[in-house]
Amino acid sequence: MNIFNIVATAAVALAAAVSAQARPLADIEKSGTIILASEGQYAPFNYFEGKKLTGYEIEVGEAVAKKMGLKYEWKTVGFDALLTGLAQDRWDLVIASHAITEERAKAVTFTLPHYCSGGQITALDPKIRTAADLAGKVVAVQTGTTYLDSVKKVPGVKDVKNFPTDEAARNALSSKRVDAWVTDRFVAKDLIRKVPQAGLKTGDMLFVEQVASAVSKGNTTLADAWNQALKALIADGTIAAISQKYFGEDVTCK
Ligand code: ARG
């Protein structure tokens, strides 16, 4: 390939990337099916039971799609590929426990939140409970999460170790390769209930956050329709019932 070919090929690739258009609501309605994306490795929010994708967010996503009069199709990919896939038009909406942050809001448009939660300190040693207790300690978090950002800001932490999944971060704690793990408070609560023998103990919450779905930046027709359907399902108790099933409490934002 000579330099002209290289430049021409690069220009075509760039044009393709730029012209990838998010599907507005009208296009999705015309096709009849919304493409939803999640991670599938974040119980009890989104995970696999055998071959079946399930969890609070999966049921919320399916209920909202139905309310919008749409069929749905799921894609599951690694957490770090979810938001970038929106910009590439690989799916219409991501529902995978992304908190609404200023940084992310530069790249995507968030819907209304479907739960309120926060990052919680989790350890085997009952003496590790507060942010101050993390001084001199090694802490595990999932890459690309708000937990990573927040632990980086805790003064005196010896090392923050990143893992591709939240479960890998938890395994690092279970096998004592780290001193603490920061994860979602409901993820920790669910584990303590389901696997009491693991001896996990929860300490303070480091921060609170609102968790929402994301659509391609500026795809407001889709975000508005999603919000309207979600609001109706919150009002009629559908979302609270799904929440009770997974958490034994209502995790929607009060
Ligand atoms: N709530 C956290 C965040 O906003 C963690 C999300 C992790 N989600 C997942 N599917 N593993 O970054």
Image: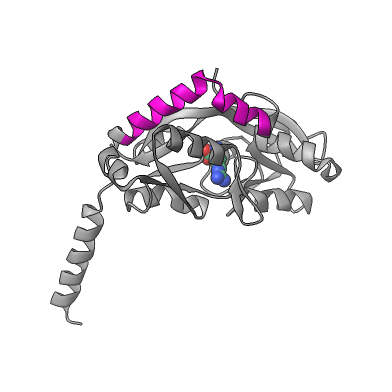
Between 200 and 216, the residue placed more toward the observer is 216
Q: Residue furthest left?
A: 4
Q: What residue appears at the point 27 percent right and 41 percent down from the top-left corner?
A: 24
Q: What residue appears at the point 78 percent right and 41 percent down from the top-left corner?
A: 194
Q: Relative to 235, is 245 on the left or the right? A: right
Q: Main secondary structure of the magenta part?
A: helix
Q: Position of residue 190 (x, y in %)?
A: 72, 37
The answer, for residue 67, to whether it is visible in the render is yes
- 138 to 185, vertically: above or below: below
Q: Position of residue 85 (x, y in %)?
A: 39, 52
Q: Position of residue 72 (x, y in %)?
A: 44, 46
Q: Is residue 250 magenta?
A: no
* The C terminus lies in quadrant: top right
Question: Whereabouts is ligand 1, in terms of quadrant?
Answer: top right
Q: Position of residue 121 (x, y in %)?
A: 69, 35
Q: Which residues are magenta?
A: 222-245
Between 226 and 42, the residue placed more toward the observer is 226
| Quarter-of-image position of residue 187 | top right
Between 171 and 155, the residue placed more toward the observer is 171
